[in-house]
Amino acid sequence: MFKAETYVARRKTLMERVGSGIIVLLGNDEAPMNYRDNTYRYRQDSTFLYYFGLNHADLAAVMDCDAGTVTVIGDELTIDHIVWMGTQPTLKARSEAVGVGHTAPAASLKETVREALSKNRVIHFLPPYRDTHTLKLARLLGMPIDNIESAASLDLVRAVVDQRNIKSAEEIEELDRAVSVSTDMHLAAYRMVRPGLNEAEVAAEVQRVAQAAGGDISFPIIATINGQTLHNHYHGNTLKSGDLFLLDAGAETPMGYAGDLSSTMPVDPTFTERQKEIYNIALNAHNASIAQLKPGTPFRDAHLAACRVIAQGMKDMGFMKGDVDEAVAAGAHAMFFQCGTGHMMGLDVHDMENLGEVWVGYAGEAKSTQFGLKSLRLARPLEPGFVVTVEPGIYFIPELIDLWKRENRHAEFLNYDKIESYRDFGGLRNEEDFVITEDGARLLGKKKPKTIEEVEALRQTSS
C-alpha cells in the first residue's frame, strides 16, 4: 500500500467535494465458487482500495463529511480465523497504517445508518455491481432492492470519477510496473507460439508470468487463433501453420493496478503477405491514434483518426470504396473495426466501469448509438494524469459479413465480393498503454514488439 498520508489526503479531498452527509463505502466479501469455504480469488473493491488501501474481506467504511471523521468497520479475527489463516494484524493496526484511528464492529454499520436516516442526513453510496452489496444496502437503508441502483449518489459517483481519473506520480509508478510485467507476459507468448501447441498452454504460461511477479492477471486472458471474436476466452484450439495468434492479457500488481496489452503474431516464424497487409493497416491506425494523445484533445478524435486510417487502408486494398470521410461518418468502417480504440485504465483494467462510462469516459455527455462508435468507452477531452489504452484492430466476422450483405448495408462503401474472399481471415490488433503528460503522452512500462520487423525478429530467434 501507499503511505498513510496518501489515503488521508484522498479521503479529505473526497469529503470536501461531496460536502455534507455520510459516505458509506462497502468493501468486497469473499465469493464462494461452489460452497462457502471454497472461494474465488479475492479482489477488493477498487474504490475501497483507492481510499483505504485495505485488501481484506468483510470491511466497510463511513466518512462523515460534516464532522470530518472516518471509521473503518469490521470485526476483529477470532481464534477460529487464526487457526485457518495464521497470525494476522488486527483491524485496528491495519486501519492505523492507512491513517484511520477509529474502528467499529460490523454490527455498528446498521446503527450508524439508522441514526443518519433518523436525522434526515444524506447517505451517499456508489451503485453496487455485486448482488451481495445490493442486498446489504437494501437492508441498511430499508429500501426495496429494485430501488438501490437509482438511489446511488450521483454526487459521490462524479467526485470519485474526477479524483480517480487523474493518476498521481506514485500511481503512475505502480502502473509502469503493471505494464512492464504485462510486456513480459507477451514476450513469453512470442517466444513459445508454434504449430501444434494448444491455446491453453500459451494462456497458462502467460498467467504464470503474472503470478511469478507477485501479482495476478488483471482480466481473463484472451489467447486465441480466432481474433475476430473480441472477448474470446476459449482456449481449446490447436495452433496450426498459417494461423494468426492474438493475445490480450495484462498483469495486476499486488496493489491492484492493471496493465492491458494486446499482441498479434504469426504461428509460423513469419507473416504471410496477406497477413502483413492487414497487420500494417491496423498498425498505421494504432500509430495515428497515438499521435492524437495530448491534453485537450478529445479521445474521440484519436478513435476517429484510427477509423479513417483503417477505412483508407481497406479502400486501397479494394474492401471499401467511395469517400473515406463519408464512409467513417456513416459507420461503414465498422464492418472491420467494430469496437472502440481504447479506455481508461488504473485500479480497474476498464477503470471505474462500474460507475458508468457516461461519467468516466464521457464527462456526462451522451454516447453515440451508431454501431461501432457506441462501443467507444472513452471520448472526453484528455487531461494530464489520464491513463488510456490504444488498441484499434481489424476483424473479419463472418456473421457480420452475412448480416450486412443480406441487408445490403453501406453498399455504397463496401465491396462485398472482396470482403467474402477474406471471411476466414480472423482478426488482429496491437495494444499499448499511455499516460497523458503536460505536453503529450508517454508509453507506460517496457516496450513490446509491434512492427512486422520486430515481431518476426523475435519469432525467428525463438523458433
Image (tube, helix red, strand yellow):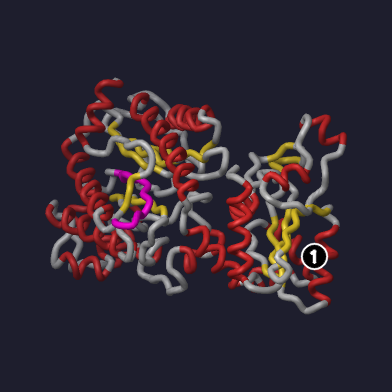
Q: Nearer the viewer, residue 271 or 392?
A: 392
Secondary structure state at the residue bearing disc 1: helix
Give the quadrant of residue 343: bottom left
Q: Is residue 74 visible?
A: yes
Say whether residue 177 is left or right of residue 225: right
Whether residue 243 appears in magenta in the rendering, the answer is: no
Whether residue 437 appears in magenta in the rendering, the answer is: yes
Say whether residue 349 is left or right of residue 381: right
Quadrant including the N terminus: top right
Q: Which residue is mark 1?
A: 139
- Residue at 59% across / 57% down in the picture? 9
- Residue at 63% across / 45% down in the picture? 43
- Residue at 67% across / 48% down in the picture? 98
Instruction: Classify 10 Å Cα crowding around label 1: few (below 14), some (14-19), many (20 and above).
Output: few
Percent from the top left, x then y, of residue 278? 21, 45
Quadrant including the C terminus: top left
- Residue at 46% across / 39% down in the picture? 178
In the picture shown, does residue 290 fall above or below 76? below
Percent from the top left, x then y, of residue 52? 65, 51
Residue sticking out furthest to the right: 79
Give the quadrant of residue 402: bottom left
In the picture shown, does residue 86 fall above or below 278? above
Q: Nearer the viewer, residue 232 or 21?
A: 21
Q: Nearer the viewer, residue 201 or 319?
A: 201
